Amino acid sequence: MWQVWLIISGICLIIEILTVGFLVFWFAIGALVAMVASFFTDSIVVQSTIFLVTSVFLLFFTKSFIKRFVNKDSKTVTGSFAVIGKTGIVTKEINTDLAQGQVRIDGDIWSAKTETGEILPEGTQVKVLRLSGVKVIVEKI
């Protein structure tokens, strides 16, 4: 019977590889524990019970264990909104009245304007306050 449990474990691992969740892995471990139990008993009921108990125990234990280390409130900001709060350097004078100005932020060039209409010369260090369309709204640091 140990071969059957080994095959079940392998199938569970293949399913785990093909899916995005970390769920079926614990059933693969449960099948391996049932395989070890098959060396000591021929009862399929005992082996199946060991498989189910081990799998469910690992599933619930690791879920609560992983929650301790994963911060759900932490959200990773991606895309253009990731520049908000970052600092940059003015590469082309920012003059809101003339609708000109550029800022280099993390190696990327952004069109920029100031919130107050202040003119900022090249080389000025700025902080991004928010986005307005495709332009960043900055303030002098």
Image (tube, rainbow, N blue to C red):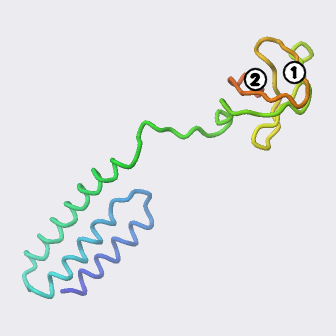
User: For the view shown, which residue lies furthest in the front direction?
Assistant: 141
Mark 2 residue type: Val
Give the structural element (helix, strand or loop) at label 1: loop
In the rendered structure, the answer to whether residue 21 lies left or right of residue 8 reads right
The label on residue 138 is: 2
Please tell me which residue lies in front, 50 or 119. Answer: 119
- Residue under circle 1? 120
Between 47 and 100, the one lying in front of the other is 100
Camera-side residue of 124 and 65: 124
Q: Which residue is pictured at 75% across the width and 42% down the height?
A: 106
Which of the labelled discs sits on residue 61, or is there none? none
Q: Which of marks 2 and 1 is nearer the N terminus?
A: 1
Amino acid type assigned to the residue bearing label 1 in the image: Leu
Which one is in front, 115 or 47?
A: 115
In the displayed structure, does residue 22 sit left or right of residue 85?
left
Proximity of marks 2 and 1: CB atoms separated by less than 8 Å: yes
Marks 2 and 1, Cα distance to the nearest angstrom? 10 Å
Q: Which residue is at 18% across, 77% downward?
A: 34
Residue 54, by quadrant, is bottom left
Percent position of residue 27, x then y = 27, 67
Q: Which residue shows up at 33% across the image and 48% down it?
A: 68
Left or right of 124 on screen, residue 70? left
Q: Mark 1, residues whose alpha carbon is within 10 Å: few (<14), some, or many (≥20)?
A: many
| Rendered residue at 88%/25% (across/down) | 101
Classify 53 as above or below 43: above
* Spot occupied by residue 74 in the image (x, y as percentages of width and height): 47, 38
The image quadrant that residue 81 belongs to is: top right
**On the picture, is 11 further left or further right than 124?**
left
In this view, 51 is above or below 133:
below
**Circle 2 — which element?**
strand
